[in-house]
Image (cartoon, rainbow, N blue to C red):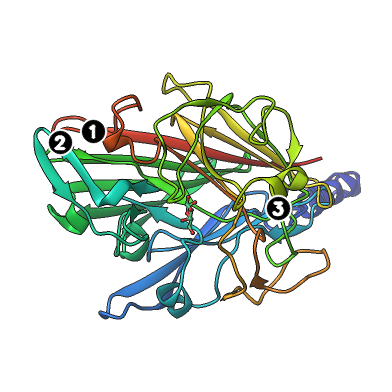
Amino acid sequence: MRAKYVPILLAVIVLFVFGCDKPTKYGEKKMSIKKQAFGKTVDGKDVDLYTLTNANGLKTEIMTYGGIVRTLEVPDRDGNLGDIVLGYDSLDEYIENNPYFGALVGRYGNRIAKGKFTLDGVEYTLATNNGPNHLHGGVKGFDKVVWGAEPMEDETSVGLKLTYRSYDGEEGYPGNLKCTVIYTLTNDNELKVSYEAETDKATVINLTHHSYFNLAGHGSGDILAHELMLTADNFTPVDEGLIPTGEIKAARGTLMDFTRPTPIGSRIAQVKGGYDHNYVLNSSDGSLALAASVYEPRSGRVMEIFTTEPAIQFYSGNFLDGSNKGKVEHHVGYPTVGTVYNKHNGFCLETQHFPDSPNKANFPSVVLKPGEKYTHLTVHKFSAK
Ligand code: GLA
């Protein structure tokens, strides 16, 4: 080779090694999706765990059991990944005692009073599993079934398509219901959850996702310093059994007001039992709109939630009581308080229709008829500041 070409060749090599092929800040070069066996259910069904990684190194593990998001690692303001969802190490722990950590919830997220409703003149009786009421789909809701799974990938995202066929009469609901939920992790650092369902008989439906978040990292104590903003001027007050009274009440200027960013803990002591309320979103035309924004000051992590749904349940982890011993591994970077999850150690923001809608004529309808398609899209967008 002529000597004059040597510097050019060297430059090309240097560019290739240190330029094009340079690992990103988070140590990953490419998006990927991997599958591993994760055990068996009590009735012998195989459960798989899929690990989705985007081009920036954000990572989530999703189980076919309950469509559960077991881990979700996102960067803080210094680029350190932290696992920001509560969860367990093993499948058995999820099977034994899971307060819906990371789970898909269906057929009906939240409560239906006394487990009863009437549709087209027929009264239906659902499984009751929360005192006299029906909660989150009943005794064996969508959080406890094994979903079919198919990995997906395009130029800008990796995804997992989950499918479940719920039979006519399951937990008391009418109609065979075909459900598809697609989790997508995009290179814009979003976790999207997209739901679709069809029925062969008129029924009611309200699917949601039930991750408990702690943006400082799971196991780093309570979530009271997180600043929460909800694009909701109104909420639906509840009775002692957490069933909506039917009223739609203004939140502004009350203890329930999150129209401006407010630390979750600033007024929680005055809210009996803590927050466990359905907020009515200001945008209600079914288009994708900002519903919530959460900022955690220590890590700088921000989560924004966009949804097509009319409401969001804000639950401040009031029933966590130390009986759930969480995942051992940490990628947090903050003092770890311990992974026994105590009261207010995580919060949920469940995009949804209003609780007990089948019994409240003034609430938006949750009826799905044959020939119609139920759709719901929620996007969790992660950043740091
Ligand atoms: C929802 C409900 C809460 C509670 C949790 C699960 O957020 O609104 O009352 O049942 O789920 O523990």
Under circle 2, the secondary element is strand
Residue that mark 2 sits on: 119
Q: Residues within 10 Å of mark 2 (few under 14, many from 20)?
A: some
Residue that mark 1 sits on: 367
Hey, what amino acid is under mark 1?
Val
Q: Residues within 10 Å of mark 1 (few under 14, many from 20)?
A: some
Q: Please provide percent x and percent y for residue 357.
A: 32, 35
Nearer the observer, 325 or 92: 325
Q: Quadrant of residue 122?
A: top left
Q: Is residue 112 above or below residue 290?
A: below
* Residues at marks 3 and 1 touching, judged by CB atoms closer than 8 Å: no
Q: CA distance from mark 3 to mark 1?
A: 35 Å
Under circle 3, the secondary element is loop
Q: Please provide percent x and percent y for residue 200.
A: 11, 40
Instruction: Look at discs 1 and 2 and give the one toward the viewer.
Output: 2
| Label located before the other in sequence (1 or 2) | 2
Tell me the residue at 27%/37% (across/down).
358
Residue that mark 3 sits on: 215
